[in-house]
Every structure is written in C-alpha cells, then in structure tokens.
Amino acid sequence: MGKSLFANLSPANKYILVCCFSMFVVNGLYAMVLGPLLPYISNEYNLSDTISGMLLSAHQAGALVAGFVAGILPFYMGRKLSIVLLCTFVMVGLIAIVLTGNPILLITGFLFTGISRGGISNFNNTVVTEVTNGNAPAINFLHSSFAVGALASPFLLILGIHIAGDFGWRLTALVLVVLVGITVVMLACAKIEKVDKAARRAKLSYKFLKDRHVWYNTGVLFFYLCVEAGVTGWLVKYFVDTGTLTSGYAFVLASLLWAVMLVGRLCVAFMGSKLSRKAVLAASAVGMTIFYIILLATQSATLITVAIGGFGLSMAAVYPTAIANLGKTIKHYPMSIGVVLVISGIGAIVMPIVTGVLSDAFGIWAGMSAIIAAIIMMMICAGLVIFDRSSLNAE
C-alpha cells in the first residue's frame, strides 16, 4: 500500500485500517493455532482422527455461516455493533475448548471460533476495499497481517507450553481471549460509516451471480481454501503421527509456512501494479502442485523444509489476488463478498473432515494425499480466470 494512498485517507479511515490490520493479526493467531493445538486437544480428550477432523471442519463451517450473515447484519444492526458481536463468539468458543472435552461442546467451541473468523474476514475485506477503493496492495497488506498472526501462532503455543507445561495449551487459548477483547475495544472506538438503509435494495442485489468471472475466481478460492484448511489443520499432526519430524520441528515448519507466505504477500503488495494478477495465479498454481508433491514424497527433513518454503511462497498471493480480481464486483455489489466467502468456505469445511476420515481408514498419508486433487482443481480454475476476457473485473 503506497504512502500516497495512506496519506490521502482521513484520520478516521486511517484508524479503521489500523483496526482491520490488528483484527487480522489476532484472527491469524487464533485461526492458525488450532492446527498445532489439535494434537494436545486430541490427547487430552482422547479423540479419534475423525472427531479431530470434525473439529477443524466445524471451525470452517462457522466461518462459512458468518461470511454470509456478516453481509446482512450491518443492514439491521449497523457495522460496528455487528462486527463487535461476531468477534465475541471466538472468546466464548476458546473458553469452551479450555473447559470441556465433551465432543458436542468442543465442536460448538470450534464452530464459534469460525463464526468470528468469517465475520472478521467479511468485514475487513469489505471495509478495506471500500476505504482504499479496491487498492490491490492494500488488500495484500491486509492479508499479510493475517499471515503475521498465523506465523506467530505456533510460537505463542510453544511459549505457553514452556511456561505452564501441560496447562500450556490452555494458557495459549486464554491469552487469545484477552487479545480478541483488546480488538473489540479498538473497534468500539472506531468511526465506522453506517450502511445506507435507503440503498438496501440496491446493495442486496444478486446480479453479480450472472458474471462467470465471479464464479471462476470463486472456484480458485474454493479449492485454495480446501488446500489451506487441509494443510494448516493437519500438517503438524501428519509429521508427528508419521514420526517424520519431532513435534518441535513440526511447529517450526508450521511457522515457516506462514513466514514465507508473509514474505510473498508483502512482495506482491510492494510491487503492486508491476505484477500481472494472471501471471501470479499461474505461477502460484504450478508451484503449489510441485512443492506439495515433494512434501509428501520425501522423509528428508531438509527436503521437507525446502518444500514447505516453496509451497508457502506459492500459496501467498492466491487468496488476495482472487479477492482483488473481484474488486469492482465487491464495490458495486456488497453482498457479493458474503456469497463468495460462503461458497468458497465450503471447501475449507470439506477438506479437513475428508482428510480425517481417510486418515482413520487408510492412514494419515492417504488423507494428506487427497489434498493434491484440490490443488489440481484450483489450477484448472486459475486457468479459467487467466483466459477469460469477458468481465469488467478482468485485467
């Protein structure tokens, strides 16, 4: 995001961006710590891989529901009150996870964390797009802030375990409750524009559904989220269960994945218009395919580390690029971001449970291998985006 863009914003809009970036850091922290937490929760409560997969899917289901609801609530509750309400769900969810091993309550807790994640994602993508007039580097900076939180999440867990031992994973969850509370206070102080109720009918239009470019980018997001949810949710458990790596090194690789994603997103953000979105999508799809196959095909710690680095770098720009591709649609049809996030979020729900079921039936390697199909489908959808010239959203 260029200096000129930030300098031209009003103080109120600058503060709103600070709130959005801060929320996404915390969002990344709690969303991506769930994968590293999973082995501890599973051992503590003696859960099967299928139930563990259901927990991850419940988180994604909550994000899907909130992605749609968050697009409607502001018309009735106002933007500020609706996002504050949605943020409180993760606090309740994390406390439930800490206090109980009951599978139903655990699933509900993970569902609640997803509701907050989806609500924040919808709010941030919409507000940053509006405030910056769809500026692609700004959107990349937004998603880079998520990567900062995701990068730090395994280290937060390691610190919690170092301080409190067996209680460490619970301490980590409680720290996250406090951090979410801080962002809620920040939001309460923001001057956020109210939704124009007189324009509700226009804003609730679904005319964008006729644009095939919207569907192509939604396909990219759907299969990308399949991959992201599957890999980030199961990566640590995969390495630990197969005995390929120690849990400590697996945590390091989980952070490395997000570190290179952060670097990739910042590079795309700084380079801005110098990079073709279509070229970025093409390179990302090919890179993800190659590096993920290497990741599963080797037991060498060195090669795995290289593969994780290459895979994370390849993943970096896919989500923000697909969102930026839809910039004009989001601006003219605010309901579009909710619909896109809901449909694409189904992928994030399906993949973790598919991985868990296959893991119980055939072993965890088989479960992780299923993610290759999602990567290939993402590549096909990226190809459709690249060669489609019909839409006003296209480059």
Image: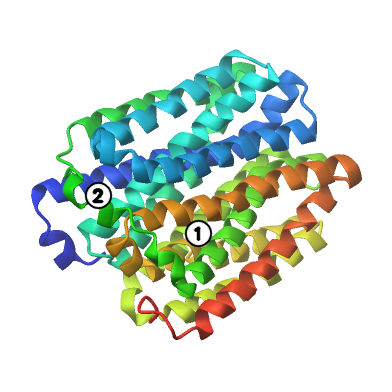
Q: Find residue 120 and report its horizontal and vertical position in percent.
A: 38, 42
The image's mark for residue 211 is none
Q: Residues within 10 Å of mark 2 (few under 14, many from 20)?
A: few
User: Which residue is disc 1 drawn over?
Assistant: 261
Q: Nearer the viewer, mark 2 or mark 1?
A: 2
From the viewer's perspective, is residue 37 above or below residue 348? above
From the viewer's perspective, is residue 199 above or below residue 188? below
User: Which residue is disc 2 drawn over?
Assistant: 200
Place residue 224 in its image quadrant. bottom right
C-alpha span from label 2 to label 1: 37 Å
Residue type at the position of mark 1: Met
Q: Residue at x 38, y 32 (%)?
A: 86
The quadrant the C terminus occupies is: bottom left
Q: Find residue 377 and report its horizontal and vertical position in percent.
A: 67, 68
Judged left or right of residue 365, residue 200 is left
Judged left or right of residue 223, residue 129 is left
